[in-house]
Image (tube, rainbow, N blue to C red):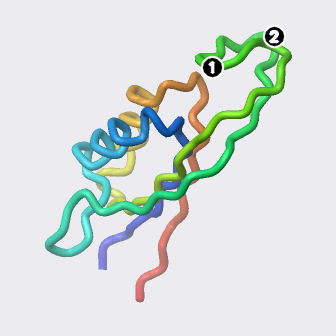
């Protein structure tokens, strides 16, 4: 079985559809004969931009809260670099909160 990864990324709700589509177009979300597979849930993201930051939302040194969507999808090892590059290009934040987990074969 080919090596696979789970990608989890948090994005403002209004940008979620565009990011999800871009990730899928870059090769994420393929499960068997299905493409564009993902799971999402909403929550509140919190952050405080530091002096060196150029925040898209909020102001330097002020705590910000944003309604965000957590997008989970899977990705083959061959597509991982492309998908992560796409996240950085499409995501509105300067520093997208992104987790990558290696998946075990089953």
In the drawing, what numbered circle is on residue 57? 1
The location of residue 29, given as percent across then percent down, is 30, 60
Task: Name the secondary structure under disc 2.
Answer: loop
Q: Residue furthest left?
A: 33
- The residue labelled by disc 2 is 51
Identify the residue shown where x is 40% and y is 26%: 89
The location of residue 41, given as percent across then percent down, is 52, 58
The location of residue 12, given as percent across then percent down, is 53, 35
Q: If you read the primary sequence from the N terminus, does the residue marked by circle 2 or circle 1 appear first?
A: 2
Quadrant location, the C terminus? bottom left
Question: In the picture provided, is 46 more to the left or to the right than 19?
Answer: right
Q: How many marks?
A: 2
Task: Name the secondary structure under disc 1.
Answer: loop
The residue carrying pointer 1 sits among few (fewer than 14), some (14 to 19) or many (20 or more) residues within 10 Å by Cα, namely: some
Question: In the picture provided, is 8 more to the left or to the right than 22?
Answer: right
Seen in the picture, residue 31 relative to 78 is either above or below; the reply is: below
User: To which quarter of the image does residue 36 belong?
Assistant: bottom left
Question: In the picture provided, is 44 more to the left or to the right than 82?
Answer: right
Q: Residue furthest bottom?
A: 106
């Amino acid at each position: 079985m080919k090596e696979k990864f789970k990608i989890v990324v948090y994005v403002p709700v209004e940008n979620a559809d565009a990011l999800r589509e871009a990730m899928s177009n870059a090769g994420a979300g393929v499960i068997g004969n299905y493409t564009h597979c993902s799971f999402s849930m909403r929550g509140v993201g919190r952050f405080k931009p530091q002096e060196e930051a150029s925040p898209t939302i909020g102001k330097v040194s002020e705590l910000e809260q944003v309604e965000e969507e957590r997008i989970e999808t899977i990705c083959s090892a061959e597509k991982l670099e492309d998908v992560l590059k796409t996240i950085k290009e499409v995501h509105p934040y300067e520093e997208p909160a992104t987790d990558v987990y290696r998946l075990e074969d089953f």
